[in-house]
Every structure is written in structure tokens, then in C-alpha cells.
Amino acid sequence: MTATLGALAWLFAVVAFGAILPVVPTGAAVSGAAALAFHEHHPLTIVFVIAAGAAGAYVGDLVMYAMCRLGGEQLARRLRWLRDEEHLASVKERLQKSQIPVLLVSRLIPGGRVPVLLAAAFLGISWRTFVVANIPACALWSSVYAGIGVAGGSIFPEPWEGVVAAVVLILIVNQAVSWISKRREARVSTSGAGG
């Protein structure tokens, strides 16, 4: 039990750190932990993995949001969070139209969370709106990635095989979404330049 609690604490820390500095594949961490928990044959452990992942994501998002609200665009540029001004402008526009749905969905889209957090902070969306919308977003995100981990763990007989399968699947999905987004943006900019 102590080892499980220690692993959950590490998962919380890794996800929180990865939410603040998006260099850690946090989804893969949740999926890997869920795949390992599946092989323990204790369904409650999977629920704890989801809770630890969601809590880490939530705390990390709150810290990042606070940093963006206090430090503004200058801090975001310094930390290299702000890379694409045009994309940020379109996200700001979407947030002005419908705040809650955009905040909810942003966590599920690979590469979508950071631009939405930045836009929300720069627009000055209230803390209350952000705090309330981010709870279900983090819970849903953690549940989806844990589900991927459980699926990987159920396919393979060895725990390490399930972890590897879950991580590879997440990396493939993230790369595919990134590639599709870049192709779509290139198409839009090409049609905009031609018109």
C-alpha cells in the first residue's frame, strides 16, 4: 500500500510539473500508471490513478494560469509558452464567444491546453470561471488517458507491454493531431493568401 501511495504521489508531481512546464508527456504518465494499476487487479487503484492525474493537472493548470495572469505576455514569451500569435488570436476569439466549452475541450486536444490557458489569462477570464471549468476538464482528461492505459494493459499480458503500448498510442495520437492541425493551418493560410 505504501508503494502505491508513493507511486500516486509521484504521478501527481509529474503531472503537475508537466502542466506548468509542458515538456513532460503527462498523458503518457497517466496511461502508464493506469496500465500498471490494471495488472494489480484492484479496480480502486485505477480510480486513484485518475484522481491523482486529475489533481496534478488541476494544480498545474492553476499555477500556470496564475503565472500568466500575474506575469502577462512578457512572462509567457520568456518561458516560451507563447509561440504562435495568430493562433492565440483565434483562441481569444473563440473564448470570447463561449468560455466554458472552450475551457472544457482544451485539455483533450493535444497542444490545445496551453494556447487556451494563455488566451484566458490574457483576456482576464475570471478566476471563478476558470477554476470551475477546469475541474471537469482535468477529470475528463485524466479519465480518457487512464482509459487508454487500461485498454493497453488489458491487451498485453505483461504490465510493461501495456505501459509501452499506451505510451506509443498516445504519442501517435498526439503526432497525428499535431500533423492534422499544421496541415489545416497551412491550407487556411494558403487560401487566405490566394484570396
Image: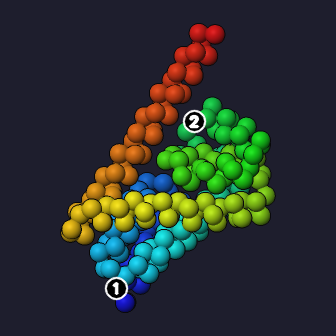
Q: How is the image coloured?
A: rainbow
Depth check, front residue: 172 or 81? 172
Image quarter where the C terminus lies is top right
In the image, is 11 to the left or to the right of 63? left
Mark 1 residue element: helix
Outermost top residue: 194
Q: Amino acid at mark 1?
A: Ala
Outermost front residue: 155
Q: Amino acid at mark 2?
A: Asp
Label 1 crowding class (10 Å Cα cut-off): few <14, some 14-19, many 20+? Answer: few
Residue located at (72% from left, 64% from top): 132
Q: Residue under circle 2?
A: 84
194 in relation to 139, above or below: above
Q: Position of residue 45 (x, y in %)?
A: 41, 79
Residue located at (35% from left, 75% from top): 37
Q: Position of residue 115 (x, y in %)?
A: 60, 45
Tell me if I can see residue 163 in this picture.
no
Residue located at (34% from left, 73% from top): 38
- Labelled disc at residue 3: 1
